[in-house]
Image: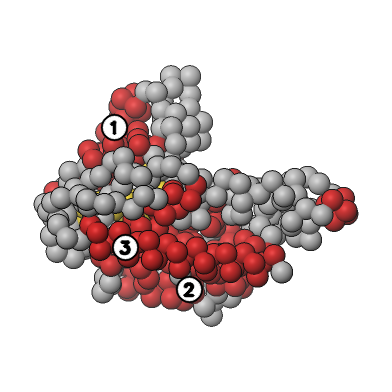
């Protein structure tokens, strides 16, 4: 019953959002250069970019309205400078919050090394979990490609006191099931494999990753008719200067080898000095292949055939869930072509004593972080831009299921919401 009510509430909200967005579009479409004279009262306007982008402000409902309206409009920064269809799409999953601006500036610095001839045909999509002024500042500083900000509309930041955020009526994580049933908390019947109840902060990443996969291939107008790969990155990534050169070589090799996915994350550590010309063909392995993963439209459609398997698998990590799908659902397990030498550096998990950028949290010393990353690139400079690349390691098609379920994904509301993205 609660799940039915939840679906009705979502449907009513979507109808209201659609009506509000249509009204807003009518009001703002009369002039390309002038803002609307009568903006919707429920959409407080604090920042309006020439592209039409608005930084959402206000109550949770107002934030949701702004997020949906933004995703309908799909504003593009630098559209007046760069024209034509994209030749490469890069989608970055952005958490938002302190330090996000610095991390995006570092990522932009690395993307730009591909050169103006390449980046001018690049569409950079930033998929954000929450409004973030730092992120907007970083976007405004990018002048070498088109940038499209979108919002993950089911983020906990938009639902702070209700599902898919943390509902006060939900069961505490470690409450025993029998006690939870006596207490009558909302999800008492649905602990995970390890007996724990959902934590909204941990369900975010899998929800966001799966939603943006759908939104990219099904909803982005700039991607309609696009037949290339989309490169999926995470906040905290820093690409090596030959990332695009290597990606193109790998695409050609993939056609010859019949692979499904490309990974710039590498199969060896930089310290081991792997051969920069060597590639590996293997089954998808979550921790090894998740960084800088390139996916084609064809593979996306194959994954959609395993919608239920991905969305009901009791693991809050999208990569382990994808490995489960590869091992149990697809007619053939996913084959990944990856470079031995990683072409993406990941910021450390925690800031060090010098306050440099990490993958999460504030970044008080971005200059030092940039300098350290550039120094690492200089150390590798003589080993980059190989003329050719070849597969030297091959694994037969192996169905390698995850060794265990990490849990955190036992709630049927998460299962239903996850599967609903294919219909939105």
Of the pair 336 and 199, the residue shown nearer to us: 199
Closer to the camera in the image, 296 or 171: 171
Drawn side of residue 422 relative to residue 179, left or right: left
Quarter of the N terminus within the rendering? bottom right
Earlier in the chain: of badge 3 and badge 1, it is 3
Report helix, strand or loop for mark 3. helix
Front residue (pair 246, 321): 321
Tell me whether the residue at label 3 lies in contact with that at label 2, contact meaning CB atoms closer than 8 angstroms.
no
Name the residue that disc number 3 marks.
23
Visible residue check, residue 378: yes
Q: Earlier in the sequence, mark 2 or mark 1?
A: 1
Q: Is residue 104 left or right of residue 286?
A: left
SS of the residue under disc 1: helix
| Residue indicated by mark 2 | 423
Residue depicted at 31% across the width and 63% down the height: 23
* Residue tagged 1: 374
| Residue 384 in the image, given as x and y percentages of width and height | 26, 45
Separation of residues labelled 3 and 1 (CA atoms): 48 Å
> Farthest residue toward the top?
353
Q: Between marks 2 and 1, how big is the CA–CA gap?
A: 43 Å
């Amino acid at each position: 019953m609660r799940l039915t009510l939840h679906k009705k509430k979502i449907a009513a909200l979507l109808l209201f959002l659609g009506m509000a967005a249509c009204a807003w579009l009518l009001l703002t479409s009369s002039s390309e250069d002038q803002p609307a004279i009568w903006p919707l009262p429920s959409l407080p306007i604090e920042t309006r970019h020439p592209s039409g982008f608005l930084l959402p402000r206000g109550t949770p409902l107002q934030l949701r309205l702004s997020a949906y309206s933004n995703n309908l409009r799909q504003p593009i920064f630098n559209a007046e400078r760069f024209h034509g269809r994209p030749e490469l799409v890069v989608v970055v999953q952005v958490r938002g919050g302190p330090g996000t601006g610095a991390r995006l500036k570092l990522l932009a610095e690395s993307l730009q090394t591909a050169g103006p001839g390449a980046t001018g045909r690049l569409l950079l999509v930033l998929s954000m979990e929450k409004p973030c002024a730092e992120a907007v500042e970083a976007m405004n500083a990018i002048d070498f490609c088109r940038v499209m900000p979108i919002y993950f509309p089911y983020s906990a930041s938009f639902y702070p006191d209700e599902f898919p955020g943390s509902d006060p009526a939900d069961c505490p994580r470690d409450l025993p099931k029998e006690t939870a049933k006596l207490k009558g908390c909302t999800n008492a019947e649905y602990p995970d494999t390890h007996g724990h109840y959902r934590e909204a902060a941990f369900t975010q990443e899998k929800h966001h990753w799966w939603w943006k996969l759908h939104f990219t291939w099904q909803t982005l107008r700039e991607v309609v008719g696009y037949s290339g790969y989309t490169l999926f990155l995470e906040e905290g990534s820093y690409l090596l200067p030959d990332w695009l050169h290597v990606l193109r070589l790998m695409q050609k090799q993939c056609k010859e080898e019949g692979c499904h996915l490309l990974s710039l994350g590498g199969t060896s550590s930089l310290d081991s000095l792997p051969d920069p010309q060597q590639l590996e063909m293997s089954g998808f392995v979550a921790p090894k292949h998740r960084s800088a993963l390139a996916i084609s439209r064809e593979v996306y459609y194959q994954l959609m055939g395993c919608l239920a398997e991905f969305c009901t698998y009791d693991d809050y990590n999208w990569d382990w869930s994808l490995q489960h799908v590869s091992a149990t659902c697809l007619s053939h397990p996913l084959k990944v072509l990856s470079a031995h030498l990683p072409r993406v550096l990941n910021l450390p998990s925690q800031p060090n004593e010098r306050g440099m950028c990490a993958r999460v949290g504030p970044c008080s010393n971005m200059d030092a972080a940039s300098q350290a990353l550039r120094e690492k690139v200089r150390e590798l400079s003589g080993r980059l831009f190989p003329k050719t690349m070849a597969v030297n390691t091959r694994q037969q098609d192996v169905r390698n299921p995850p060794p265990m379920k990490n849990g955190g994904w036992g709630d049927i509301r998460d299962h239903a919401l996850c599967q609903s993205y294919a219909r939105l």
